[in-house]
Image: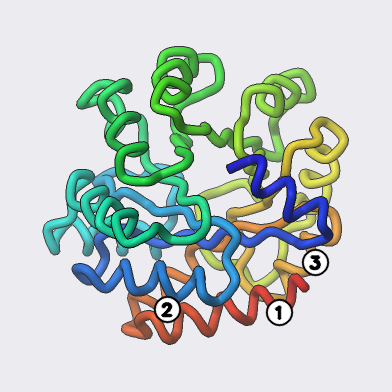
Amino acid sequence: METQLRAKRDAGRKLLAPYLTGGLHGDEWLDVLRAVVDAGADAVEVGIPFSDPVMDGPVIQQASARALAEGATPASVLAGLAGLARLGGAGVPLVAMTYANVAFRPGPERFARALAGAGVAGAILPDLPVDELDEWAAAARAAPLETVLLAAPTTPDDRLATICERSEGWVYGVATMGVTGERSALAQTAAVMAARLKACTDKPVLMGVGVSTPEQAAAVATVADGVIVGAALVRRVLDGGGPAAAGAFVRNLRDALM
């Protein structure tokens, strides 16, 4: 995954990694995934629903709760991705985003193998700190998976260096303090955080949390290598827009990042 993203970045492309909630609206979420890839995503984060998504704000919390109520489980989400892989895959790297409880309940080795077996290239466990990463990292590398780590605006420089060193695929820069969600304006911390990360690593730096509009995406990408957009996309799916609305929104993001 990192190799692919580096190549695109080095060719001058700004990277776009939309987030969507796996299992939302039955099998329709797979059509949404295909739509956002067709619209220009370079990677897609697939959220595996969890009952206590501590990093997420109201929109993604609602999406997770609805997916769970509709019967989504980690196994069903991965089964959907495995079916997609049998048809040739998504065409871009897929990254599973979930929480440590989901990964460690079956055991990290088993969960990592299940992700890789479903065609997933990487994983994000936002509540697993770098200090406690070793067991998961060993299981992920054996699978194999790349583990994307997050860095917040309050992260001190020494810890930032450790996160950049150990992150794989890309480094996930948190644009603003708080949970995921749409913001009316891009936080001033976004550009500062992107610059700190770019000074710390040559790995792709993607900024997320609070990046909500094409204009905001373009602004932060003047410093960062790309963006992650979740709540604004998931809201459109929750509102019933389906693949068409999701694809149109991602296409607008892609156009703004060109």
The residue labelled by disc 2 is 236
As displayed, is residue 245 above or below residue 14? below
- Name the residue carrying label 3: 219
Q: Quarter-wise, where is residue 166 in the image?
A: top right
Disc 3 marks a residue whose amino acid type is: Ala
The front one of 31 and 99 is: 31
In the displayed structure image, the side of residue 188 where residue 243 appears, left or right: left
Q: Which residue is mark 1?
A: 255
Determine the secondary structure under disc 3.
helix
Please provide percent x and percent y for residue 150.
59, 37
Residue at 39 percent of width and 19 percent of height: 139
Mark 2 falls on what kind of element? helix
In this picture, is 164 found above or below 71? above
The type of residue carrying mark 2 is Arg
Separation of marks 3 and 2 at Cα, in angstroms: 22 Å
Packing grade of label 2 (10 A; few <14, some 14-19, many >=20) is: some
Q: Nearer the viewer, mark 1 or mark 2?
A: 1
Instruction: Give the quarter of the figure containing the C terminus.
Output: bottom right
Q: Is residue 30 visible?
A: yes
**Percent from the top left, x then y, of residue 255?**
71, 79
x, y (%) of residue 1? 58, 43
Q: Earlier in the sequence, mark 1 or mark 3?
A: 3
Q: Amino acid at mark 1?
A: Asp
Is residue 64 visible in this depiction of the protein? no
